[in-house]
Image (tube, rainbow, N blue to C red):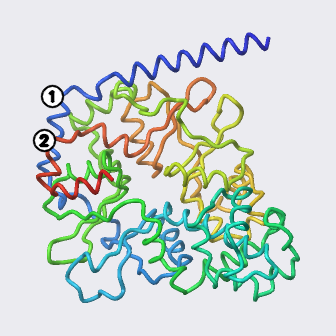
């Protein structure tokens, strides 16, 4: 029986391998149609794209605390916001006015590193900023988060350690024997350092949005003008991997619009009924070469693994979400996204032991706590033969950033993101960015 199951599994894997080799060799679209669409988007000005809901772009000042920034993103149900320099109110140059973009991707990097530093502070009953060395950080990193090295040590500020030690938290707990033991016994005291005292709710410069912008920037702040082409925006959001594109009118530094991947896909959904869209939308995703990533490269998280590991995996691979799976066949049972870090930061009372919390318990706790709001969405899936139109409809209607491709008994075999969908409609003409943005801009995008 075991041998039969093994042979069956091996046969299925061989079939998947052949399938993905096949779809990766297919063209995305007939060349004539793709060139026609690319030319059409090149003629559409950015000014024609719908503005943000409410007509005003949500901005966050650089001296805002990380805690307040998370609240703003959560309350506005957005993933990112431009960061404004409070000292450049009178400047007419957008380079002075805006410092970058804050998003959950950057916040999670800061939180994971700060979590380790907070645990180190709690683990040393007589620690001082100068006395906590690489050994303590490295020991905890190996057991807890895997964040080690000079960067972690450099981030250990006197404020972060001092708040825990002076406040007596570590001394009261008596957990200064070794970092791993201390980390296993932090419990709710984790939040006394990270969330209630230092560094999360601090008003010091180390705990402001400006620090995250300087230290954890994943993507450049690249605005376009209202008369730029939508083709440029679509290329920035797909091939060049930007998550959002600000629109700024020359001589008027305030952001007029803020175009995201999600907004573009929702805009594509609104094109239903037009010949060019319907022609593409009726095609199976496999005919468009989707999913781009082979099934054995899809990054997943098991239901019984730690939620910290899920966030760490997202950080390490620079991705925004993971399918939650069960068993060796990776049957999908849920989804965790990078924005879910907000629950750990804004509702610490829901999680009494952060470090021992499994992905399954994390998902169950969130569902119970948010049933009335309906803001928790289960994993969205499609089949290998689903049409692109149905995928776009799911992404747009559910306001999610990825859809998981499943086969057989809901086994995860791929993922399709907003970026993948956008890339199906356009290609980059020769010298497009050299002509429209300059050689230096393209070099920066390719870094």
- The residue that label 2 is drawn on is 39
Q: Residue at x 45, y 23 (%)?
A: 20
User: In the picture, residue 269 is in which quadrant?
Assistant: top left
> Residue 57: image x %, image y %?
33, 71
Q: Residue at x 35, y 82 (%)?
A: 85
Q: Tell me: residue 169, above or below residue 336.
A: below
User: In the picture, residue 129 is in which quadrant?
Assistant: bottom right
The answer for how far apart the CA atoms under marks 2 and 1 are is 11 Å
> Residue 233: image x %, image y %?
24, 53
Give SS at disc 2: helix
**Left of 210 or right of it: where is 238?**
left
Q: Residue at x 23, y 53 (%)?
A: 442
Q: Tell me: residue 26, above or below residue 121.
A: above
Give SS at disc 1: helix
- Tell me the tag on residue 32: 1
Q: Label 2 neighbourhood size at 10 Å, few (<14), some (14-19), many (20+)?
A: some
């Amino acid at each position: 029986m075991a041998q039969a199951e093994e042979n069956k599994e091996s046969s299925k894997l061989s079939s998947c391998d052949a399938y993905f080799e096949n779809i990766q060799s297919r063209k995305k679209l007939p060349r004539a149609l793709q060139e026609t669409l690319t030319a059409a988007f090149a003629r559409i000005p950015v000014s024609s794209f719908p503005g943000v809901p409410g007509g005003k772009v949500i901005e966050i000042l650089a001296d805002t605390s990380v805690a307040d920034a998370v609240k703003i993103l959560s309350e506005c149900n957005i993933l990112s916001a431009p960061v404004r320099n409070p000292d450049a109110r009178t400047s007419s140059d957008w380079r002075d006015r805006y410092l970058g973009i804050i998003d959950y991707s950057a916040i999670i990097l800061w939180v994971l590193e700060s979590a380790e530093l907070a645990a180190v502070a709690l683990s040393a009953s007589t620690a001082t900023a100068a006395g906590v060395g690489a050994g303590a950080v490295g020991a905890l990193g190996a057991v807890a988060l895997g964040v080690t090295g000079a960067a972690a040590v450099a981030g250990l500020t006197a404020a972060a350690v001092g708040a825990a030690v002076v406040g007596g938290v570590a001394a009261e707990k008596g957990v200064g024997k070794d970092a791993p033991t201390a980390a296993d016994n932090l419990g709710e005291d984790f939040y006394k350092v990270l969330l209630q005292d230092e560094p999360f709710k601090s008003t010091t410069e180390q705990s402001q949005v400006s620090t995250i912008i300087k230290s954890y920037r994943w993507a450049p702040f690249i605005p376009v003008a209202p008369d730029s082409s939508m083709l440029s925006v679509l290329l920035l959001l797909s091939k060049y991997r930007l998550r959002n594109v600000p629109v700024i009118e020359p001589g008027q530094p305030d952001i007029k619009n803020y175009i995201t991947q999600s907004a573009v896909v929702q805009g594509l959904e609104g094109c239903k009924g037009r010949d060019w869209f319907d022609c593409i939308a009726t095609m199976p995703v496999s005919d468009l070469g989707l999913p781009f990533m082979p099934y054995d490269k899809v990054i997943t998280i098991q239901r019984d693994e730690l939620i910290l590991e899920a966030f760490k995996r997202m950080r390490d691979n620079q991705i925004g979400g993971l399918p939650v799976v069960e068993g060796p066949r990776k049957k999908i049972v849920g989804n965790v996204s990078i924005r879910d870090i907000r629950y750990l930061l804004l509702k610490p009372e829901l999680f009494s032991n952060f470090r021992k919390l499994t992905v399954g318990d994390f998902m169950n706790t969130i569902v119970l706590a948010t049933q009335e709001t309906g803001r928790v969405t289960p994993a969205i899936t499609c089949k290998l033969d689903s049409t692109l139109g149905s995928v776009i409809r799911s992404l747009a209607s559910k306001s999610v950033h990825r859809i998981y491709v499943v086969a057989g008994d809901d086994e995860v075999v791929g993922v399709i993101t907003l970026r993948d969908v956008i890339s199906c409609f356009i290609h980059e003409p020769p010298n497009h960015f050299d002509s429209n943005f300059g050689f230096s801009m393209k070099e920066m995008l390719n870094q």
